[in-house]
Image (cartoon, rainbow, N blue to C red):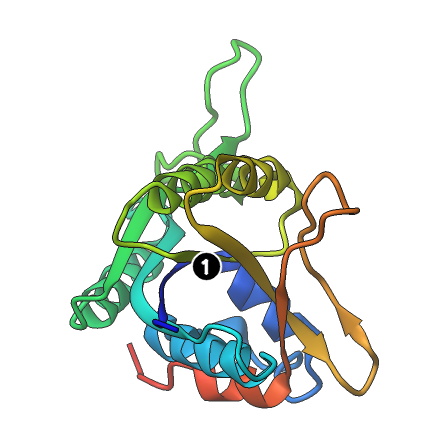
Amino acid sequence: MPDLRAVVVVDYQNVHLTGHGLFAGTKYLPKHETLVDPLLFARTLIDARNAAQRPGHDRAVLRRVLVYRGLPAPEHDPAGYSRNLAQQDRWQRDQRVRVTLRPLKYEYERGPDGRPASDAQGRKIVLGVKEKGVDVLCALALVREAQDPATDLVILASSDSDLAPALDEVRDQGHAKVETCCWFDERTKVGYRVHPTDRSRPVWNTRLNEAAFQRSRDLTRY
């Protein structure tokens, strides 16, 4: 049977931080030292997925990797902003990889008038920061890619349960197969995966162990 042309949709922060915190070999390292290279990750995922299939089942070949990630604001984190752009540039050297950066959402301290307060240097005082809208972009990509006649399989790389409706939609539409993947610690038997809403109709999930995480790491100094 012909190979399945696969697109991997990557919720980058979820993939990176979940793996970083799960495995003994990386959980105590600085987070910036455990970055995941999207292409290495996708190749590792496809290899693990194919190895787990029973004889006679369709194998997957990587067609595209779509990455969605938050982007620090240059005024608050100039070094992080520059690193993110450098990583985007490097990862996209392979034409199969596309990295979409969405500005992070900042929460500011506010004065009595409700306006953002400033420090002695006139800079806004940041209380917190989080990604906003990345999960929506991942959901849209999952549904959009499944409708592409050139795609036979979409794989969601995320453990965010908010993406369950997107899995439901792709499966109900029936254009392309949909699967998931997750990091899984073989030592502790702990892993985090996203399930479709109707668990009586499961989707295939590929478990990736610590060795897979190590093979996926981006060791470039940015």
Q: Residue at x 43, y 49 (%)?
A: 176
Q: What is the x, y in percent for residue 20?
A: 60, 74
Quarter of the image for residue 9 reads bottom left
Q: Is residue 89 above or below residue 175?
A: below
Q: Residue at x 71, y 53 (%)?
A: 202
The single residue placed furthest to the right in the displayed view is: 188
Q: What is the x, y in percent for residue 33?
A: 47, 80
**Residue closer to the observer: 203 or 37:** 203
| Image quadrant where one finds the N terminus | bottom left
Q: Residue at x 46, y 16 (%)?
A: 115
| Image quadrant where one finds the C terminus | bottom left
Label 1: few (<14), some (14–19) or many (≥20) C-alpha neighbours in 10 Å: many
Q: What is the x, y in percent for residue 29?
A: 59, 82
Q: For residue 10, say whether it is visible.
A: no
**Residue closer to the observer: 82 or 195:** 195
Q: What is the x, y in percent for residue 153?
A: 42, 58
Position of residue 203 in the picture relative to residue 139 (left or right): right
Q: For residue 107, say whether it is visible.
A: yes
Q: Is residue 21 above or below residue 133?
A: below
Position of residue 176 in the picture relative to residue 186 (left or right): left
- According to the picture, the residue beneath numbered tag 1 turns out to be 12
Q: Is residue 185 above or below residue 143?
A: below
Does dot 1 land on a helix, a strand or a loop? helix
Q: Amino acid at mark 1?
A: Tyr
**Residue closer to the observer: 124 or 100:** 100
